[in-house]
Structure formats: structure tokens, C-alpha cells
Amino acid sequence: MKKNTSNKRKIRHWYKLDLSANVYPTLQRRNFSSVYRVSVILKQPIQHELLQLALERTMPRFPTFAVAIHKGLFWRYLERNNKPGPFVKADVSNACMPIHFKAENRYLLRVYYYEAKLSVEVFHSVADGSGALTFVKTLLAEYYAMQGIRIPCEQGVLSCKEKPRDAEIEDAYIKYGNGKVALKRKGIHAYQLRGTQEPFYTLNIITGVAPVEKLLAAAKSYKVSVGVFLTAVLMESLIQKQKMDKPIRERDVVISMPVNLRRFFPSDTLRNFIVMLSPSIDPKMGDYTFEEIASEINAYLAYRLNEKYLKANIMTNLSVQRNPVVRVIPLFLKDMIVRNAYKKVNARESSAGITNLGIVQVPEEMKPLIERFEVLMGQPFSNRTNLAVITYENTISMSFSSGIVESDVEMLFFCSLIKKGIPVRIESNRKYRT
Amino acid sequence: MSYCVNCGVELHKSAAFCPLCNTVVINPVNPPDTHAKPPYPAEIGKVENVNSRGVALLLTVVFVSIALAALLLNLFLFKEGLWSAFVMGASLLLWVFTVPVLILRPSRLLIILLDGAVISLYCFIIARQTDDASWYFGIALPIIIMLTGFVFLFGYVVKRFKTSILFKTAFIFGELGFYTVGIELSIRYFLYNSFSIRWSAVVGTSCLIIVAVLTTVMKNTRLREEVQRRLHF
Ligand SMILES: [Zn+2]
């Protein structure tokens, strides 16, 4: 009896939202929430009953995923969710639809299956892409364990027999947020895509699949990494698109990209640990060649991707959150202020988003069972197009998601890859436009 | 499996057109496999709306108990007159105004019709309780029916056709003109038994002029762009 109570005290029942997590629920609307999805395409069709069992075994290992979001007087918080669920569902065409906090038994996580594709959708306050990827890999290992295939717990696969570790649920921003200076924000009005809005419950997805070795060779010929290369191709496409729009005055083209801070500050957290960087090109300065765009982005990142700069970047947001005045403003006022500021400033600060989850490592035993991985950003807050990239073995998946009918940026992007000698296979849920 | 002739990407074997440039796949050697599973499912998911359902249930319980309480009091305690009809009518009115909006969110047109019907019903209850009920069929009912009709028509047009802000404004002014004329007609017919109009002619004409101006602006592209530039928000 006594042992039982002492065990119980160890389980945390609620979590403060981490630094990145705070803004997402504020922007919540009936038709918008910050949801993204991580998918894995297997070689065999998915047995969904087994997947449900595997999910039930996996959830207790990820306490920060089995949560509901609640409102406090000053801040929102995550609370342990003991309701039944989440339940595995047949996949839908409109991926990443809004998560309503009180629906679906208050879970902030969805699991879908379609043929051989397993998809997990996560509300961004719960975890970032890296945390979600660990969840997917562990779920997959459990799913195979159900079928008698033993997958060792290595390469980011967690053992569901073990208790969750404190390091996995820590708020790493607090841990490393001990800098002395904060960066100043500079507000710019970036180029915004225009287009015909699709009706609610539509997310247009275009995924391009390409061999990594070809992409690597192309990137090498410009002396940059694959990530920088793809950002440069997207940048070039956006610049071209703006030229096609024939604006009176050209605006800066800005791409916002999250940087995984785990690369710079050792942390095992499964929650958010990213900051946003935004390389930009001012087309008014003249016509940039692709080489110039690539080296510009490369230089931008080379200057910023180091511990000191990133710490100052963390401090920018952290100092706002720690400000005593900000802390005692009631939540509904905070929501109003942040929502307006976001609409007027942040939503205009970037023309597109790019997320690169990098190379997925899986245990050797899992490799023959997996075809490829796929990531997808949800419906963007403003009209921008989002690109999400993930690499597995020799396959790189590049998924565009957008809420507008026109697919000009996507076409410019993939045609540019083709012209640079990279063969691309396209998959999409778009409907034929008459 | 085909390649897009226009942009050169490889396409999924089920693809009948290129998702990037919308070019149709015409490949006599290897036509699109219509039986192959497409890469993404076609079913559209809907978000469940738990919150509103709870509120709807709560409102229903509140209104039903108010109506019941009034009915019981009327039957057994305060027996003079059928005053509970007002309370029950009002409860029904408020219920129809609030609950369908929470549950039937997508079908706004149905809600408009329901609202019109329940307003008519409530006015009818009032009319039955008063001595002279002729005003109900003479004025109230025509005005309510016309209003419901015009709102319904506007809702239908907005839902059915892609309309610009200019068109919506013009449509509203047009409806407003007809509605004023309709109101004066029914008042005059009820009071003097004659079909003629006076003051509404002024309102109606002004509305028609506004409609004419707006349609001209809509027809003229340059003028429309100018208006959009100056009034954009
Ligand atoms: Zn094409």
C-alpha cells in the first residue's frame, strides 16, 4: 500500500506548456490548429486491430503525449488524460484537420492507417517533429512485437517496458535558457502568396519522392548541404512566383525554418525544442542566380547555427514569458494580444515554411519492413505554402501542404529539381481542376 | 506509371492527370491504372463537435423545464387565462434560435426557414390570446414571410454561387428595395384595402439606383479594380 502511494507521487499530473507550445493554442480557431503529421509507409498493409493494441501499449511510455490541454487563469497547461483513447482510425484525405480541444476525448494526437501507411498527427504544443518521430518509431516497434518480430530498443526506439525518464519530459528551454542577452526582433513584411482559398476541410498535398544520392550530388556541386540546397530551390521558386505576380513593389522573400536544438544542446526531451530561423532574399537588390541564393542561405545559417547565437534566440521568447507583467495578465487578454500581434506581424513575416526532419535512423531489424517516411505540415495560418522534408535510407520525401487551389510554387520547385537532374516521383490528393 | 509531358515528373500509376500542372495523362502504352489504390485516401474527415452538443443539451433541458413549469402552474395554481402559452412559445422561440445553430451548423438555410417558422408561430400564439387577431394575417405574417424569404434567397445565392462583396451589397440593396415596397403594400392593403405605394417608392427607387451603380461598377473591370484598391481592408 505504502509503496503504491510513493509510486503515484512520482507520476506528474500536469505540465506547463513549453516555450514554443504556448503560441499554438492561442492561434486556435474553429478552422485552424497547428497540427502536423509524421507518416511511415511500410511494405505490408497495416493490420489496424494490432496497431490499436500497439498504441495502447505505447501511450503509457509517452506521458507528455497522453495529455489534454486546459485553461488556467494565466496560462494554459497540459494535464494527464485518463479517458479511453486515442483510437486508430481509417485515414482521411484532409490530413491535419483542426484538433478541437474538447473533442475526441480531449486527446491531442491522432493515429491513422491507410493501406501500408501509418500516420500520426500531433498538436504542436505536445511535441516537435523529433519527439513525434520517436513516438512513431516506438509505436512501430510495438506493432511488430505484436506480430512476433522483435525490434531492439535502439536508434530512437524506446522500450515500453521501461518507465518514462525525467529527461524525456523536461522543458529543455528552461534548462538552457540561462543566457544574458536576447535578440531584438525585426519586423519585415515578407512576400505573401495569393491564391484561391479552398473550402474548409481541404488540405492540398503534393509529395515528391526522390533518390538521395542524386540530391546529394546536386547539393555537392553547389558546395552546400541537402537542407540548404532544398531551401535554396524553394527560395528560387518563390522569387520566380513573385515575379510572375508582377507586383508594383517586390517584397523580401522569407522562408521560416525550425532548427532542432537537440543538435546543439544535448537533451532527450520528447517535447518541443526548436527555434525558428528565417533566411531571406531581397529581390529588389537584383536578379539572384541559384548559386548566389544557395551561398546566401549557407552563409546565413553558418553565422547562426552555433550555441551562442541560438541561446540568444531562445532568450528572446523566454524573456517575454518571464516578464512579470506578462505573467500576471489573464489568459484571455494574453490570447487577444498575441492573436492580434500574430495576425499583424508574425503571419506576414514569412513567405513559406520549410521543415527538415533530417535522416531517420531505425534499428537494422526494421529496415526491410519500411519503404519510406513522410512528414506533413498542417494547414498554414496564413496563405503560405509549407514544405516538410524527411530522409530515410535512399529516399527523400518532400511534402507540400497548402490551402489554396493554385500549385505554382510546387510546380516551380519540382521542375527546378528535374532541371537539376534529380528525378522526382509525385503523389498527391489534389483533384483535377476543370 | 507515366511521366508528365509538361513538367517531366514521374506520376503515380493511378494518376490520370499531373497534380502539379493539371496536364491530363495520355499514355496509350501504359494508361492510368484506375483500379490501383490512389496514394492518398478520398474520404473527407469531419471534426466532431462535442462542446456544442453539451451546450445544446443543457439549453434544451432548461427551456423544456421552463415550459413545463409554466404549464403546470397554469393548469393547477394560477388558472386565470392561458398565460403559459406565452412562456412556452417564448421557450420554443429561444430554443429554435439557439439549439439548431449549435447542432446544424453547416445548413444555415434550414436554420433561416426554422427561425421564420417559429417567429410566425409565436406571433400566432400572441394573436390567439388577443381579441382581434386580424393584424396577424394582415400584417405580421406577410412581413415575416417576406423577410424570411429575402434572407433565405440571399443565403442561397451566397452559398450556391461564388459572389463578390460588390455583388452581395447590390443584392442586399435590391432585396431591401423590394422589401420596403412589400411592407408598405401590406400595410396599405390592411388599413385601406388598396394596393398602392407612396413612401416606399422613394426608398425603392434609391435602392434600385444603388443597384444600378454597383452593377455598372461590377461590369467595368477597371472601375472595379479602382474600387477594390481604394476600399481594400
Ligand atoms: Zn505536370
Image (spheres, coloured by chain):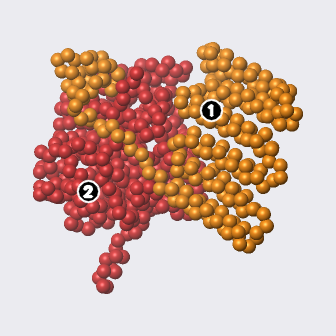
Residue at mark 1: chain: B
Instruction: Work out whether residue A74 or residue B60 is closer to the camera in this orientation and state it.
Output: B60
Quadrant the N terminus of chain A occupies: bottom left
| Identity of the residue furthest to the bottom in this view | A2
Residue at mark 2: chain: A
Q: Assess disc 1: are there few (<14), some (14-19) or many (≥20) residues with their C-alpha within 10 Å of its C-alpha.
A: some
Q: Is residue A373 above or below residue A111?
A: above
* Amino acid type, residue under disc 1 in the picture: Phe
* Amino acid type, residue under disc 2 in the picture: Gln
Instruction: Work out whether residue A293 or residue B103 is closer to the camera in this orientation and state it.
Output: B103
Quadrant in the picture for residue A409: top left
* Place of residue A430 in the rendered image (x, y in percent of width and height, measured from the top left): 35, 31
Q: Which mark is residue A78?
A: none
The residue that disc 1 covers is B154
Relative placement, left or right, of B90 versus A212 is: right
Relative placement, left or right, of A126 versus A183 is: left
The residue that disc 2 covers is A52
Residue drawn at 82 percent across, 33 percent down: B189
| Identity of the residue furthest to the right in this view | B192
Instruction: Work out whether residue A149 or residue A212 is closer to the camera in this orientation and state it.
Output: A149
* Place of residue A168 in the rendered image (x, y in percent of width and height, measured from the top left): 31, 61
Q: Say yes or no: labels 2 and 1 on the same chain.
A: no
Quadrant the C terminus of chain A occupies: top left
* Place of residue A247 in the rendered image (x, y in percent of width and height, measured from the top left): 52, 21
Residue drawn at 31 percent across, 42 percent down: A375
Q: Colour of chain A?
A: red
From the rendered image, report the letter of the chain displayed in orange: B
Residue at mark 2 to residue at mark 1: CA–CA distance? 48 Å
Q: Is residue B67 above or below residue A44?
A: below
